[in-house]
Amino acid sequence: MSKNTFIKDLEAFPKDIIIENERGLTFLGYPFYSPRLLIPRIDPPQFQIFIHSTGLLQCVSDDIIQSFQYFYPLESQFDEENAIKNDEKWFVMMDFKDRYDMDDQGWCYSWSFNNSRWKSKNGIVRRRVWVKLPSKKK
């Protein structure tokens, strides 16, 4: 199974990466996107984790999830084992090394999830990349 260009480009980014996927339709000229429109066994699940060691995407859940905060909290969490606070937060990746166009919310659009061409508008599927980065110390 060959990796598409989008996945290959993720290898250069931080370790913790989550990809959010949605499918859309146009009704009376207005686009509507939702994870509920994803087609089972054809489309990827709503959330996927990028595994750096294998370079593949792993399914987080086959169920529709309101937010991936269910699995990965957005704010820093207290680590009881080390008794320190992890100063890391989740951010939507807005700059993909000028390789992909994105809209103002970080979504890339295409006609299929396996397509190598992603753009900032016009497509029936969309995805955005969440990365976990250290936050600034106060």
Image: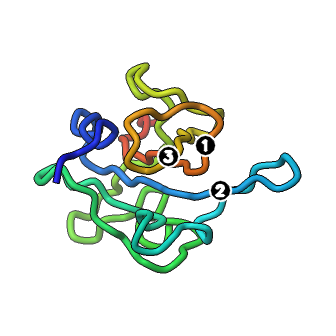
| Inter-mark Cα distance, 3 to 1 | 13 Å
The three-letter amino acid code for the residue at tag 3 is Arg
Whichever of callouts 1 and 2 sits on the residue coming sooner in the sequence is: 2
- Residue 44 horizontal/vertical position (percent): 41, 63
Residue for point 56% across, 58% down: 22
- Residue 96 horizontal/vertical position (percent): 41, 28
Furthest residue toward bottom: 63
Looking at the image, residue 111 sits to the left or right of residue 32; the answer is: left
Q: Which residue is mark 2?
A: 24
Which mark's residue is nearer the viewer, 2 or 3? 2
Quarter assignment of residue 109: top right
The three-letter amino acid code for the residue at tag 2 is Gly
State the residue in front, 40 or 95. 40
Name the mark on residue 128.
Answer: 3
Q: Secondary structure at mark 2?
A: strand
- Residue 87 horizontal/vertical position (percent): 38, 48
Whichever of callouts 2 and 3 sits on the residue coming sooner in the sequence is: 2
Q: Secondary structure at mark 1?
A: loop
Furthest residue toward top: 98
Residue for point 85% across, 46% down: 29
Q: Are marks 1 and 2 in contact (CB under 8 Å)?
A: yes
Residue for point 54% across, 31% down: 119
Looking at the image, residue 25 sits to the left or right of residue 13; the answer is: right
* Mark 3, other Cα within 10 Å: few <14 / some 14–19 / many ≥20: many
Query: Which quarter of the rendering shows the N terminus?
Result: bottom left
Name the mark on residue 123.
Answer: 1
